Amino acid sequence: MKNLLYSNRLKLLLSIVLSTLSLSQLQAQVVYKLSSSKDNIIKIAGKSNVHDWTMRAENPICEASFGALSAEESVPRSLTVLNFSVNAKNLKSESESMNNRTYKAIKADSYPQITFKLKEAAITNVQKGRFLINAKGTLTIAGVSKIIELQVKAELKSDQSLLCTGEEKIKLTDYGIQPPSFMLGAMKVGNDLDISFSLNLKK
Protein backbone atom coordinates (compact mmCIF):
# COMPACT_ATOMS: atom_id res chain seq x y z
CA MET A 1 0.00 0.00 0.00
CA LYS A 2 2.80 2.38 0.90
CA ASN A 3 4.55 1.60 -2.38
CA LEU A 4 1.34 2.39 -4.28
CA LEU A 5 0.93 5.73 -2.48
CA TYR A 6 4.58 6.57 -3.13
CA SER A 7 4.19 5.70 -6.82
CA ASN A 8 1.08 7.86 -7.17
CA ARG A 9 2.76 10.80 -5.45
CA LEU A 10 5.79 10.45 -7.70
CA LYS A 11 3.58 10.43 -10.79
CA LEU A 12 1.76 13.53 -9.55
CA LEU A 13 5.04 15.33 -8.86
CA LEU A 14 6.39 14.46 -12.31
CA SER A 15 3.16 15.65 -13.92
CA ILE A 16 3.40 18.99 -12.11
CA VAL A 17 7.06 19.43 -13.09
CA LEU A 18 6.38 18.59 -16.75
CA SER A 19 3.37 20.91 -16.86
CA THR A 20 5.43 23.73 -15.35
CA LEU A 21 8.22 23.17 -17.88
CA SER A 22 5.75 23.10 -20.78
CA LEU A 23 4.13 26.35 -19.60
CA SER A 24 7.53 27.98 -19.18
CA GLN A 25 8.59 26.94 -22.68
CA LEU A 26 5.31 28.20 -24.13
CA GLN A 27 5.69 31.57 -22.43
CA ALA A 28 9.27 31.85 -23.68
CA GLN A 29 8.27 31.45 -27.33
CA VAL A 30 8.44 34.55 -29.53
CA VAL A 31 6.18 34.57 -32.59
CA TYR A 32 7.36 36.29 -35.76
CA LYS A 33 5.37 36.98 -38.91
CA LEU A 34 6.25 38.41 -42.30
CA SER A 35 6.39 42.18 -42.38
CA SER A 36 4.31 43.99 -44.98
CA SER A 37 7.53 45.27 -46.53
CA LYS A 38 7.90 44.90 -50.28
CA ASP A 39 11.46 43.84 -49.51
CA ASN A 40 10.22 40.28 -48.95
CA ILE A 41 11.44 38.39 -52.00
CA ILE A 42 10.80 34.81 -53.10
CA LYS A 43 12.17 34.06 -56.53
CA ILE A 44 11.84 30.92 -58.64
CA ALA A 45 14.38 30.59 -61.44
CA GLY A 46 14.59 28.00 -64.18
CA LYS A 47 15.90 27.33 -67.66
CA SER A 48 14.53 26.30 -71.00
CA ASN A 49 16.19 25.40 -74.29
CA VAL A 50 15.38 28.96 -75.41
CA HIS A 51 16.10 31.24 -72.43
CA ASP A 52 16.30 31.46 -68.65
CA TRP A 53 13.19 32.60 -66.77
CA THR A 54 12.16 33.82 -63.32
CA MET A 55 8.96 34.20 -61.32
CA ARG A 56 8.24 35.88 -58.00
CA ALA A 57 5.85 34.78 -55.28
CA GLU A 58 3.55 37.59 -54.22
CA ASN A 59 1.79 37.94 -50.83
CA PRO A 60 3.26 34.91 -49.04
CA ILE A 61 2.22 34.07 -45.47
CA CYS A 62 4.79 32.96 -42.92
CA GLU A 63 4.75 32.43 -39.16
CA ALA A 64 7.66 31.29 -37.02
CA SER A 65 7.93 30.62 -33.31
CA PHE A 66 11.40 31.01 -31.80
CA GLY A 67 12.66 30.35 -28.29
CA ALA A 68 13.79 33.29 -26.18
CA LEU A 69 17.04 35.00 -27.15
CA SER A 70 20.21 34.02 -25.37
CA ALA A 71 21.49 37.04 -23.46
CA GLU A 72 25.09 36.72 -24.66
CA GLU A 73 24.76 36.00 -28.38
CA SER A 74 21.33 37.57 -29.14
CA VAL A 75 20.41 34.32 -30.90
CA PRO A 76 17.15 32.35 -30.42
CA ARG A 77 17.58 29.13 -28.48
CA SER A 78 15.20 27.17 -30.71
CA LEU A 79 12.75 27.19 -33.61
CA THR A 80 9.63 25.17 -32.87
CA VAL A 81 7.14 26.36 -35.49
CA LEU A 82 7.63 27.45 -39.09
CA ASN A 83 4.62 27.53 -41.39
CA PHE A 84 4.78 29.03 -44.86
CA SER A 85 2.22 29.25 -47.65
CA VAL A 86 1.66 31.08 -50.91
CA ASN A 87 -1.20 30.96 -53.35
CA ALA A 88 -0.05 29.08 -56.47
CA LYS A 89 -1.60 31.78 -58.68
CA ASN A 90 0.46 34.41 -56.88
CA LEU A 91 3.52 33.18 -58.78
CA LYS A 92 4.09 35.92 -61.33
CA SER A 93 6.42 36.51 -64.26
CA GLU A 94 6.52 39.33 -66.78
CA SER A 95 4.51 37.20 -69.23
CA GLU A 96 0.81 36.50 -68.69
CA SER A 97 0.96 33.52 -71.04
CA MET A 98 3.83 32.05 -69.02
CA ASN A 99 1.84 32.57 -65.83
CA ASN A 100 -1.14 30.67 -67.22
CA ARG A 101 1.05 27.82 -68.48
CA THR A 102 2.72 27.59 -65.10
CA TYR A 103 -0.62 27.43 -63.27
CA LYS A 104 -1.71 24.62 -65.56
CA ALA A 105 1.55 22.70 -65.06
CA ILE A 106 1.39 22.92 -61.25
CA LYS A 107 -2.38 22.16 -61.17
CA ALA A 108 -3.14 25.45 -59.43
CA ASP A 109 -6.92 25.08 -59.78
CA SER A 110 -6.90 21.71 -57.98
CA TYR A 111 -4.10 22.53 -55.51
CA PRO A 112 -4.23 26.30 -54.87
CA GLN A 113 -1.65 26.41 -52.06
CA ILE A 114 2.09 25.78 -51.96
CA THR A 115 3.12 25.13 -48.36
CA PHE A 116 6.05 24.33 -46.09
CA LYS A 117 5.59 22.98 -42.55
CA LEU A 118 8.47 22.49 -40.14
CA LYS A 119 9.20 19.08 -38.60
CA GLU A 120 12.40 19.93 -36.74
CA ALA A 121 15.12 22.56 -36.68
CA ALA A 122 18.58 23.20 -35.27
CA ILE A 123 20.09 26.63 -34.66
CA THR A 124 23.84 27.27 -34.85
CA ASN A 125 25.35 30.50 -33.55
CA VAL A 126 27.67 32.29 -36.01
CA GLN A 127 28.31 35.53 -34.16
CA LYS A 128 26.29 37.93 -32.05
CA GLY A 129 22.94 38.46 -33.75
CA ARG A 130 23.71 36.07 -36.61
CA PHE A 131 22.86 32.38 -36.80
CA LEU A 132 22.16 29.48 -39.13
CA ILE A 133 18.94 27.48 -39.18
CA ASN A 134 18.87 23.91 -40.44
CA ALA A 135 15.14 23.42 -40.99
CA LYS A 136 13.70 20.05 -41.96
CA GLY A 137 10.09 20.03 -43.08
CA THR A 138 7.42 19.11 -45.60
CA LEU A 139 7.16 21.04 -48.86
CA THR A 140 3.89 20.49 -50.72
CA ILE A 141 3.46 21.47 -54.37
CA ALA A 142 0.65 20.36 -56.68
CA GLY A 143 -0.69 18.09 -53.95
CA VAL A 144 2.59 16.17 -53.57
CA SER A 145 4.55 16.40 -50.30
CA LYS A 146 8.29 15.87 -49.92
CA ILE A 147 10.65 16.20 -46.95
CA ILE A 148 13.35 18.79 -47.64
CA GLU A 149 16.09 20.49 -45.61
CA LEU A 150 16.50 24.25 -45.78
CA GLN A 151 19.71 26.03 -44.83
CA VAL A 152 18.73 29.51 -43.70
CA LYS A 153 20.98 32.42 -42.77
CA ALA A 154 19.36 34.69 -40.18
CA GLU A 155 20.27 38.06 -38.74
CA LEU A 156 18.69 39.88 -35.80
CA LYS A 157 18.34 43.54 -36.80
CA SER A 158 18.46 46.54 -34.48
CA ASP A 159 14.64 46.81 -34.48
CA GLN A 160 14.45 43.15 -33.33
CA SER A 161 13.20 41.97 -36.72
CA LEU A 162 14.78 38.93 -38.35
CA LEU A 163 16.19 38.87 -41.87
CA CYS A 164 16.18 35.31 -43.21
CA THR A 165 17.83 34.37 -46.50
CA GLY A 166 18.52 31.13 -48.32
CA GLU A 167 17.99 29.04 -51.40
CA GLU A 168 16.85 25.55 -52.32
CA LYS A 169 17.00 23.43 -55.46
CA ILE A 170 14.12 21.17 -56.43
CA LYS A 171 13.06 19.08 -59.41
CA LEU A 172 9.61 19.41 -60.94
CA THR A 173 9.29 15.66 -61.42
CA ASP A 174 9.78 15.08 -57.67
CA TYR A 175 6.35 16.70 -57.27
CA GLY A 176 4.66 14.85 -60.09
CA ILE A 177 5.01 17.80 -62.48
CA GLN A 178 6.15 17.09 -66.02
CA PRO A 179 8.35 19.94 -67.33
CA PRO A 180 6.07 21.67 -69.84
CA SER A 181 6.83 22.31 -73.49
CA PHE A 182 5.33 24.96 -75.74
CA MET A 183 5.08 25.86 -79.41
CA LEU A 184 4.73 22.21 -80.46
CA GLY A 185 7.81 21.28 -78.47
CA ALA A 186 10.05 24.03 -79.83
CA MET A 187 10.44 25.41 -76.27
CA LYS A 188 11.07 22.96 -73.44
CA VAL A 189 11.30 23.91 -69.78
CA GLY A 190 14.04 22.29 -67.70
CA ASN A 191 13.33 20.04 -64.75
CA ASP A 192 15.48 21.94 -62.23
CA LEU A 193 14.30 24.97 -60.26
CA ASP A 194 16.26 27.32 -57.98
CA ILE A 195 14.20 28.88 -55.20
CA SER A 196 15.78 31.82 -53.35
CA PHE A 197 14.28 33.97 -50.62
CA SER A 198 14.89 37.03 -48.49
CA LEU A 199 12.26 37.46 -45.79
CA ASN A 200 11.77 40.06 -43.09
CA LEU A 201 10.06 38.69 -39.96
CA LYS A 202 8.71 40.89 -37.19
CA LYS A 203 7.18 40.20 -33.77
Image: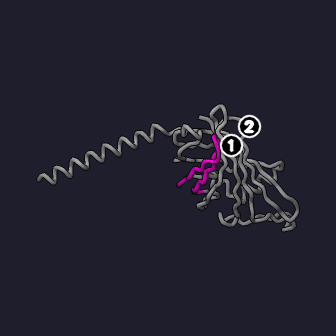
Q: Image check: 45 left or right of 83?
A: right
Q: Nearer the viewer, residue 40 or 23?
A: 23
Q: Residues within 10 Å of mark 1 (few under 14, many from 20)?
A: many
Residue 121 among those drawn in magenta:
yes
- Marker disc for residue 38: 2
Q: CA distance from mark 2 to mark 1?
A: 10 Å
Identity of the residue drawn at 60% across and 61% down: 146
Give, as a single range, the part of the protein colored magenta.
118-138
Residue 46: percent from left, percent from top: 79, 59
- Left or right of 73 in this view: 19: left
Where residue 202 appears, as percent x and y from the top left, is: 62, 35
Mark 1 residue element? strand
Numbered badge on residue 156: none
Q: Is residue 85 visible?
A: no
- Compared with residue 175, is residue 199 higher up or lower down, i.e. above or below? above
Q: In the rendered view of the protein, which quadrant contains the C terminus?
A: top right
Q: Is residue 164 above or below residue 171?
A: above
Q: Quadrant of residue 150?
A: bottom right
Lower position in the chain sequence, tag 2 or tag 1:
2
Write down the residue under mark 1. Answer: 199
Residue 21, relative to residue 138: is it above or below? above
Magenta stretch, overall SS: strand
Residue located farthest toward the front when viewing the structure as drawn: 72
Scheme of colours in the image = one colour
**Disc 2 secondary structure class:** loop
Q: Which residue is at 76% across, 53% downward?
A: 100
Q: Residue at (86%, 64%) from the top-left corner?
A: 183
Q: Nearer the viewer, mark 2 or mark 1?
A: 1
Q: Amino acid at mark 2?
A: Lys
